[in-house]
Image (tube, rainbow, N blue to C red):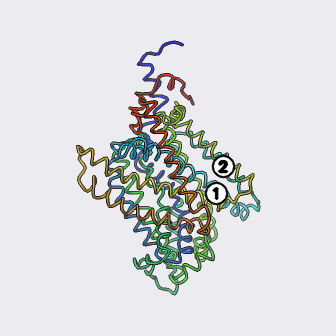
Amino acid sequence: MQSTTPAKAGKASSISMALAANRLGIPSVVFFVMTAATPLTVVAGTVTTGYATTGLIGIPVAFIAIGIVLAIFSIGYVAMAPYTANAGAFYAYISRGLSKPLGVGGAWVALVSYCMLQVSLYGGVGVAAAPVLKDWFGVSTPWWVIALIAWAIVAITGIQQVSMNGKILAVLLCCEVAVIVVFSFTDLFHPAHDAVSFSTLSPGNLVGSGVGALFSLAILGFVGFESAVVFSEESKDPKRTVRVATYLAVAIIAILYAFASWTMSVATGPDKIVSDSQNQQLDLLFNLAGQHLGPALVDLGRLLFVTSMLAAMISFHNTTARYMFALGRERVLPAALGRTSRRTGSPIVGSLVQTVVGLVVIAVFALTGLDPLIQLFFWLSTSGGVGILFLLVLTSIGTIVFFARNKAGGENIWQRTVAPIVATVLLLAVTYFAVTNFAQLLGVDPSSPLTWAFPVGFVVIGLAGIVWGLVLRARQPEIYQTIGMGGKRAIANTPVSSTESVVGQ
């Protein structure tokens, strides 16, 4: 084998181990973040589920309250972002804030959580699209056929330039947000009893036995807002892009969800929103609009309900692939995962691995006859969201510790200490609500093993990651030292042999 000069090795590394820089502006990152939150799916599904399962009418206020909590969390989160420009966001924050082994454990939990969120949507889109195809074309299509079509679209977009994905998501997101706004104003202009009621906006509605589940459902509607940091390496002016995109996403999501859930109660009347949600479930949003809008607009809304899931699949696929890339680049996972395409700059190996995982999940659920809506979509998406909630708590604590150790920056005490402490306390409370109400979130009996299996599973995965981090510290200290440090440090410490084989597209 011929020797490779340092210059050539550096060139090979920059091609195979780096994401395409300077591709994404603030709007593109916002589109990635908000599509992961699936606004139309949340308004049609999570809102009605919240009303129906808790019996409380305070979900509009719950969205506002959770938006405030996440805005406070974001103060420290974005302040630390310039020190952690890394595609593995939680991984980098926890590694640099708390410890490298904890960072590896957090990375494993993040990888599994985002993967669960992504593959769960194959069940949702299959079930949601089937009746649309039946009504429009008279074709009865098994859910898994639709899921495979969505899988192919995601697979193709996953290996394209990240900027192209941003444009696709921009179109899909703008359409679904437009539908939410039109439907919401239609509800507002046609109130029950000919009077607009503000009853559901009273903070007093957050008092009741189901308030824990209500807060938990509300925060699950925001999952994805944190992913702006994942795209920091590909952003123009990462510091400003991450900061503005995160704040914009939290504000827009909170306002949109609160407004839509309030106007639905205006249209039904506060006294009937719970019973109507229990009886009509996902159809409530479309049935209310159908009373006053033409069938064409309602059909468009149902179609965009399906495409909102497709958009979220693309967003979560990109996020998961970049986590694999970050871990592969630093050789915490196999180095092959840290390779990118020459042509597109996308993390091609990580994308292909996630594509294979999606195909396996679809095949398993199709062959075994498991319920694609409840067991695939609802259980996995809810559980993945709780995994992300655990990581938000660890990240908030890591932010406090990081700034306690590093006081040389220009951050003020509010950014460094006060906001992260307040956010940690509030997030711990929400996490407690989520875990203690997990049976209600999944819709299972409290005695079901599922009430503890998923949360305990995340703890086991995290502990396994911590153990692997300790193994790296003992056996491969050169890899251990680069954990959480991002691209330049990882590439500098990558042997030539792991970067000479470049995936070319």
* Left or right: 12, with 420 as reference point: right
Looking at this view, is 315 or 433 the one in front?
433
Q: Where 330 falls versus 377 (above or below)?
A: above
Q: Residue at x 40, y 68 (%)?
A: 65
User: Local crowd at mark 1 within 10 Å, few (<14), some, or many (≥20)?
Assistant: many
Q: CA distance from mark 2 to mark 1?
A: 9 Å
Identified by mark 2, the residue type is: Val
Q: Is residue 410 left or right of residue 438?
A: left
Q: Please give the residue where the numbered disc 2 appears in the rendered image.
A: 361
Residue 149 appears in the figure? yes
At x 44%, y 19%, the residue is 8
Secondary structure, mark 1, is helix
Name the amino acid, label 1.
Leu
Placement of the N terminus among the 4 image quadrants: top right
**From the viewer's perspective, is residue 198 above or below residue 384?**
below
Give residue 376's mark: 1
Is residue 130 left or right of 204 when viewed as pictured? right
The x, y position of residue 303, in whole percent, is 62, 61
Secondary structure, mark 2, is helix
Return the residue nearer the eye: 235 or 376: 376
Q: Quadrant of residue 470?
A: top left
Q: Residue at x 55, y 47 (%)?
A: 317
Residue 424: x %, y % from top left: 36, 59
